Amino acid sequence: MQQIGVEALRKLEQTLHAEIPLTRAMGVCVAQFNAAGLTLRAPLAPNINHKSTAFGGSLATLATLAGWGLLQLLLREQRPVTVVIQESSVRYLRPVAEYLQAICSMPQARELDKFLRTLTRTGMARIELEVSIPAGGETAVKFRGWFVALDKSRHPHAQPV
Amino acid sequence: MQQIGVEALRKLEQTLHAEIPLTRAMGVCVAQFNAAGLTLRAPLAPNINHKSTAFGGSLATLATLAGWGLLQLLLREQRPVTVVIQESSVRYLRPVAEYLQAICSMPQARELDKFLRTLTRTGMARIELEVSIPAGGETAVKFRGWFVALDKSRHPHAQPV
């Protein structure tokens, strides 16, 4: 596994806040990165809904950001690479009545290796990531996202979504 | 089709802003309701991403709100009914570089009728809604959401997601 220190996590959080203003409104912070994956957090108050639990839009957004953020960390030495989301699905299993926490699992080594090799070879690659949001010790939300990484130096005119 | 006037749209917008604070940060407004469905809008600036187009999280959130909002309008005379999202899928087909606009299509009359009859009979019903987000005259985002409506007076202890 790549060594990713506190400084890289702080930089990711700064990037999120600078480039995606909604992350500031949500109070998103980059909490942790380890062999299991990347964890993002956000307080409940700015992300509450009409039932005084976490708003579905905030949950889906935090999960999307966890996937995007994990790829930013894994690809941080391969700039300029743009990462975009192509497709996602979300299952809301139970309400979240505490601070929001999205954990993007590290992809299997074989999948990650294939993704990185394709990106190196063609300048563009796609990977599926899984994110879970726990609440009260159980899985509250399951998210799957398909992300595309694009080497801008090799595809200057490509327009990924 | 139910007659839904400007006042009901204004009330829906007030409800969104009062009960889901993220909608204020996004600048969500209720733009239009007609036989085709409900349209929500939001300016690009607070919903921008690292590529200066609309952030995927904002797009998915606006689509979720369009589905939720349409059901709020259709069920407004059947309170107290709670509407929650159970599952969704999003396909990001092209970037959105203008104001965000999510159009939730009115469900087919047969589907809507079945949904309303089930809700009346059992106090709980589920419906699938489709939302599209256009950009530059083409479909930029396709969203499908499964929503659950729950009559709280008949299921006081039920805990939908």
Image (cartoon, coloured by chain):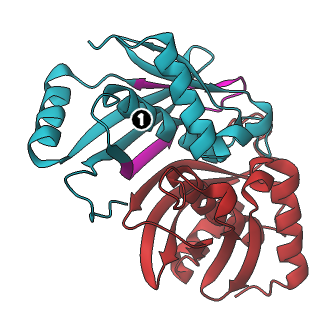
Chain colours: A red, B cyan
Q: Tell me where residue A139 appears, x and y as whole percent.
A: 43, 76
Q: Main secondary structure of the magenta part?
A: strand
Front residue (pair B125, A31): B125
Instruction: Relative to A145, say whether A141 is above or below.
Output: below
Q: Which residues are magenta?
A: B84-104
Q: Is residue B80 left or right of residue A140?
A: left
Residue depicted at x 32% and y 26%: B74
Q: Nearer the viewer, residue A69 or B16?
A: B16
Q: Chain of mark 1?
A: B
Whether residue B83 is visible, yes or no, is: yes
Q: Indicate the position of residue B138 as horizontal and vertical percent values.
A: 54, 18
Q: Is residue A147 magenta?
A: no
- In the depicted view, which residue is nearer to us: A117 or B158? B158
Give the residue pinned by disc 1: B67
- The vertical placement of A136 against B130, above or below, is below
Query: Which of the 4 quarters of the picture holds residue B96?
Result: top right
Q: Amino acid at mark 1?
A: Gly
State yes or no: residue B90 in magenta.
yes
Residue sitting at the far left: B121
Quadrant hosting residue B105: top left
Q: Residue at x 63, y 16 (%)?
A: B136
State left or right for residue B53 relative to residue A131: right
Q: Look at the picture and state if B30 lies above or below A43.
A: above
